[in-house]
Image (cartoon, helix red, strand yellow):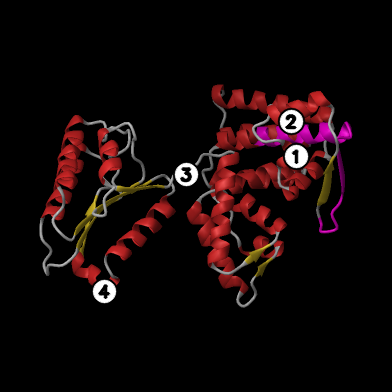
Amino acid sequence: MSSSAYLIFGGDEYRVTAKTKETINSLLPAAEQDFGLENVDGAVDTVDAAITAIGRCVEAITTRGMLGGRKVVWFRDVSFLADNSTGKSETVKSRLADLVSVMETGLPTDHVLVISSPGVDKRYAFFKACQKICTVHEFAMLEQGFAAEKQAAERLDEAIKKFGLKMNSDARAAFLERVGIDTRHIAREVEKLSVYLGQKRDIALADIQAIVTASRESKAWDLSDAFGKKDLGLALEVLRRLTCQDVSPFMLIAMIESRIKDLMIFRQAIDARWLSVSDSGRGGSAIKWHELPPDIEKIFSESFEKDPRAIHPFRAGLLASQAGKFTQRKLANCQRMAIETHEKMVSSSLQDSMILELMLIRMLS
């Protein structure tokens, strides 16, 4: 680990950028950055451009600054450290080995190299060398799933604390449902809330609904919610809006299939009296899980990616309320239609949006 070289990378672009700027500011005061900070752009997509960028980086870290003193070289947004066509080039790997050689030999006194990248292949020699000679920070962006939701909740907690805000449980669940898992989007929306609230510091559910912008993926959830509400007019309106926004039709059908699966679980739980639903008094539904038969307990705890009982009460209440609008037989028919529609989207010459509209009409009319 070296104090003269840093590697900061990962798919969480917001945190990579924040950590990079924090590192540079700790190395070089803002007042000295006009002359002491040199930027080398690493966001390139050809082998020749990558070789040129590496050469500029080597030149920058081996050349004294104009006024002497500390010099920080920021090799920024390096795109060819990942397993892509440029990164696989043996010529690029060879030039990166030259850069490693300079770093291993030792940078000139008071010279520091900071490398930021959206992705680094850990199998490559460059990363293995950096583990030995650099201070390494990784900020991975997890894919959808429980781990990604947990990480998003942690990012939300950090943003709330930063702005001195408070958010109740229902507002928190609604925020994450609407915003999704992208760290930059989370930070931006919390900052918007802070400005919107003024002197007020407690965030209510109504504030989320009034000011928070849904992410691209969360907008797709609007279609799932319209389906769950059994509102055909709203579902068709949302579908047409999402189609105009070029949201992938395959994402939309996948999310509807997922919602049907969730509703089938909750409908079965309600019918079997494993779950009771009541009015929460806040415009939603309150739920209570009861003791399950041993075989169902095993399925819930071992067979699901996330135990339905571990879903946030706000979201679980929403699903339970929507499940109450369908019978098990109707949901089974909807599941069959969704599977048929998915297959038709792959094989038919009809527009995907038209196929989805016909599916919704069959399901909800």
Tell me, yes or no, if residue 242 can be seen here: no
- For the residue pair 155 and 197, the one nearer the viewer reads as 155
Counting residues from the start of the chain, the first of labels 1 and 4 encountered is: 4
- On the image, the x and y values in percent for residue 177 come to 64, 50
**Mark 1 and mark 4: span between their CA atoms?**
54 Å
Q: Quadrant of residue 359?
A: top right
Give residue 314's position: percent from left, percent from top: 74, 50
**In whole angstroms, how far apart are the C-alphas of marks 2 and 1?**
8 Å
Identify the mark nearer the N-term, 3 or 1.
3
Q: Is residue 162 above or below residue 260?
A: below
The residue labelled by disc 1 is: 309
Give the magenta-colored segment's residue range. 256-283
Q: Amino acid at mark 3?
A: Met
The Cα atoms of the two marked residues, 4 and 3, are separated by 33 Å
Which kind of residue does numbered mark 4 sit on? Ala
Is mark 3 in CB contact (under 8 Å) with mark 1? no
Label 4: which secondary element: helix
Which residue was labeled with disc 2? 300
The residue pinned by badge 4 equals 31
Camera-side residue of 247 and 45? 45
Callout 1: 10 Å neighbours few (<14), some, many (20+)? some
**Label 4 close to label 3 by CB (< 8 Å):** no
Q: Which residue is mark 3?
A: 141
